[in-house]
Image (tube, helix red, strand yellow):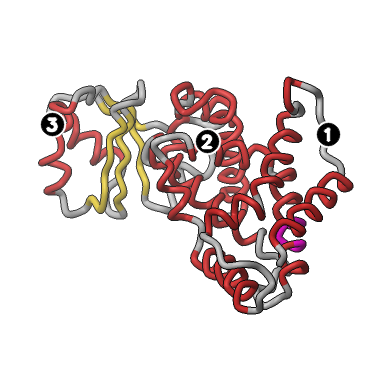
Amino acid sequence: MRSRDIDKQLLVKQKAIELMVREGFEGFSMNKLAKACGISVGTLYIYYKDKDDLIIQIAEEEAKRMSSMMLDDFDPEAGFAEGLKQQWKNRSIHMIENQQTTLFFEQLRSSTYQSVIYESYFDEFKVKMSRFMKNAIDRGEINPMPMEVYWSVAFAPLYNLVRFHNEGRSIGGRSFVLTNDMIWQTFELVLKALKK
Amino acid sequence: MDGSSINPAGVLVFKTNISTSTDKANISRLLDADEAINDWHIDLDDCDKVLRVVTHRLCAMDVIELVNQKGYLCIELI
């Protein structure tokens, strides 16, 4: 495919995510998207069969892209503190840089498309994440615990800070900007909670 | 519009008045039976009732004729 078409497809994807985040899945339509991109509806239908197909394809592509970025410089064989720190670095950077996609994922999670997002996180990501946790348990760095308990302590605090940041508001609507200091202060607390 | 008219993927897109699932059923036997059509889909949720046909052998006029045979409107979207 020619590069101009690839550029056009990228524009379509970006605009589609923006529109869906702003108007919800209900308010979103192929016609609105075509208008927002300045292309004809016909061109849009060359790429996608319908709205459902578009949502699923974009969700899958974005989940693959995000999960691959989250593995940057991450070694599942690394020590627990070092590996978790790299994960926090990757996740905070990518979730803040890809704010619209992060909001799109949250929207998907609370919708009928929920299963798409869980299935699309590619296998390498799932394998490396669970291998990292298992290594830490085997080496006696953390106690054995269900995956959900681990995730809720290891990552949910960061996700919450990023959510505050992306929304620009925290508890009670206070305006909020996330700083590096806050990220690493929270990280130290998480590390203290998990490490034996 | 550039790109779409060159149609590298063999995708043709039409606006139709195929509005209900009964209309869709009327047209589906014809499209299913055509060996030159690799795949087709109608978006009944869209106001243009967009018909999307994947074919490497038919041109837009061929598809329009097929759909017209069943009494439906079909206009190429470019």
Label 2 – label 3 distance at C-alpha: 28 Å
Q: Residue at x 21, y 53 (%)?
A: B36
Q: Which residue is mark 2?
A: B1
A42 left or right of B32 in image: right
Residue A26, above or below B32: above
Q: Are marks 2 and 1 in contact (CB under 8 Å)?
A: no
Badge 2 vs badge 3, beta-carbon distance below 8 Å:
no
Magenta stretch bounds: A85-90
Q: Are marks 2 and 1 on the same chain?
A: no
How dense is the environment of label 3, judged by Cα within 10 Å: few (below 14), some, or many (20 and up)? few
Could you tell me which chain the residue with mark 1 belongs to? A
**Residue A50 placed where, x, y %?**
38, 36
Q: Is residue A89 magenta?
A: yes
Q: Check the residue under mark 2 and report the chain it is in.
A: B
Q: Secondary structure at mark 2?
A: loop
Residue linked to disc 3: B69
The residue carrying pointer 2 sits among few (fewer than 14), some (14 to 19) or many (20 or more) residues within 10 Å by Cα, namely: few
Percent of width and height locating residue A154: 66, 55
Residue located 61% across and 36% down the image? A103
Counting other residues with Cα less than 10 Å from the Cα at mark 1, is it few (<14), some (14-19), or many (20 or more)? Answer: some
